[in-house]
Amino acid sequence: MSLDTYSLSDFVADLRRITSETDDEKTILSRVRPLAKKAALERSWLSQDHYKADPEQGFGSNLLHVETDNSLFIVAVSWLPGRGAPAHDHGTWAVVMGVDGPERNILWERLDDGTRPGHAELRKKGDKTMVEGDVIAMPTGSIHSVLNETSQTTLSFHVYGRHLNHTGRSQFDPENNTHEPFIIRTQ
């Protein structure tokens, strides 16, 4: 084993250190981004089980690490062919890295002020297809949707400031201007 390896436990230790030193999201994202890439590309965490996905959800959220207080949530997400996730926010900061296969991310901006329950107006503001080694860092409030446009299951590495089911996050329907809670099943 090389002394240059960067294990998932090394990454978690660095995340704990970074988030204990600052609560400024811009700083956290800038410091976590290169480390997430390093950890994801190391692949010592990767197993064939991480490619398993929930056919009902269209993706699999495979737990790699979560703190006992539900902070510092890390998952490997597998995307079934032709499937993805609707427009959604995370309720926390996020760093996502492509690991195996392309992942299309459509970036959205919210136009309304969020005061009407269940109502949300979105406008598409960008589109980025991530491949192995590409990283997207998203501050709290960012909205994106994900699509696997290939015929193979794809995989990405996700790091969040908090477990997604404990943030009050939403999924959005841009055509009908609605939003509702977005809960995931982890494996």
Image (cartoon, helix red, strand yellow):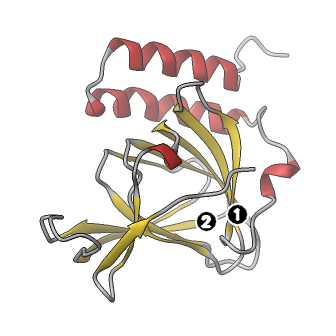
The numbered disc on residue 154 is 1
Residue 6 visible from this viewpoint:
no
Foreground pick, 181 / 122: 181
Q: Are marks 1 and 2 in contact (CB under 8 Å)?
A: yes
Image-based side of 8 in relation to 173, left or right: right
* Amino acid on which disc 2 is placed: Pro
Image coordinates for residue 32, horizontal then vertical, percent = 45, 30
Residue at 54 percent of width and 32 percent of height: 70
Q: Relative to 26, is 84 above or below?
A: below
- Residue placed furthest toward the front: 117
Image-based side of 137 in relation to 73, left or right: left
Q: Earlier in the sequence, mark 1 or mark 2?
A: 2
Residue at mark 2 = 102
Image coordinates for residue 88, horizontal then vertical, percent = 41, 64
| Label 2 element class | loop
Residue at 74 percent of width and 79 percent of height: 151
